[in-house]
């Protein structure tokens, strides 16, 4: 299982061996990501193991608004441009998977809130390193794109996501 969080600069990429729960997280430039996907495809052919790529596809959302009341027309345009560039990277990754006959699936971004409550404790409701480590056991530093890719791979593989939060009440 490969989870990908597309980004113009470096995409989050997580490789998960579901049976062993071995998880590797990286951030890769577009050319390096394509090299990695070809490598994974060749390895799957040699080992006769199935590989599946899950690509976050923000363009599947009905709305892409991340505007704040203080945003100007210029900042709104810049946000739209950045989102569109990231979406195109995701589309190109999918196009290359299609070309190389690598099974892939496009998914909407995972929910960050349920009932108005953040699922995760990081900035903008994103998953933190500590939360990811709690159910994957992965140690060391990761960036947000890598953590998002890991969460995609973990979630879509059907492995349990369970985080026990420490109480802040005294």
Image (tube, rainbow, N blue to C red):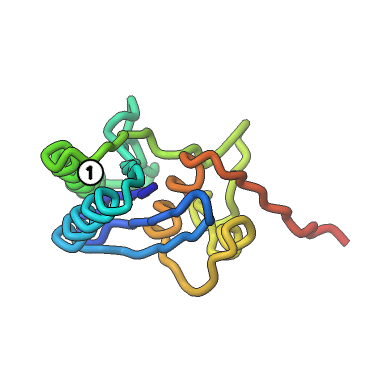
The answer to whether one can see residue 77 in this image is no
Q: Nearer the viewer, residue 20 or 167?
A: 20
Residue 40, compared with residue 105, is above or below; it is below
Q: Residue at left 25%, top 48%?
A: 45
| Farthest residue, direction left | 99
Q: Which residue is mark 1?
A: 90
* Percent of width and height locating residue 93: 19, 45
Residue 139, compared with residue 40, is above or below; it is below
Q: Nearer the viewer, residue 7 or 132?
A: 132
Q: Residue at left 33%, top 57%?
A: 12
Q: How many marks?
A: 1
Q: Residue at left 53%, top 55%?
A: 21
* Percent of width and height locating residue 155: 50, 42
The answer to whether one can see residue 160 in this image is yes
Q: Residue at left 64%, top 60%?
A: 134
The answer to whether 148 appears left or right of 100 in the picture is right
């Amino acid at each position: 299982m490969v989870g990908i969080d597309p980004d113009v600069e470096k995409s989050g990429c997580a490789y998960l061996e579901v049976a062993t729960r071995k998880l590797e997280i990286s951030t890769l430039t577009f050319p390096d990501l394509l090299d990695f996907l070809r490598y994974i495809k060749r390895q799957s052919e040699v080992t006769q193991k199935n590989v599946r790529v899950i690509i976050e596809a923000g363009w599947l959302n009905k709305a892409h608004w991340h505007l704040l009341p203080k945003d100007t027309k210029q900042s709104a345009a810049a946000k739209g441009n950045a989102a569109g560039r990231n979406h195109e990277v995701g589309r190109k990754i999918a196009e290359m998977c299609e070309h190389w006959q690598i099974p892939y699936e496009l998914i909407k971004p995972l929910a960050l809130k349920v009932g108005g409550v953040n699922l995760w404790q990081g900035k903008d409701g994103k998953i933190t390193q500590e939360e990811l480590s709690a159910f994957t056991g992965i140690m060391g530093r990761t960036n947000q794109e890598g953590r998002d890719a890991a969460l995609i791979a973990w979630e879509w593989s059907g492995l349990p996501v369970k985080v026990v939060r420490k109480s802040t009440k005294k």
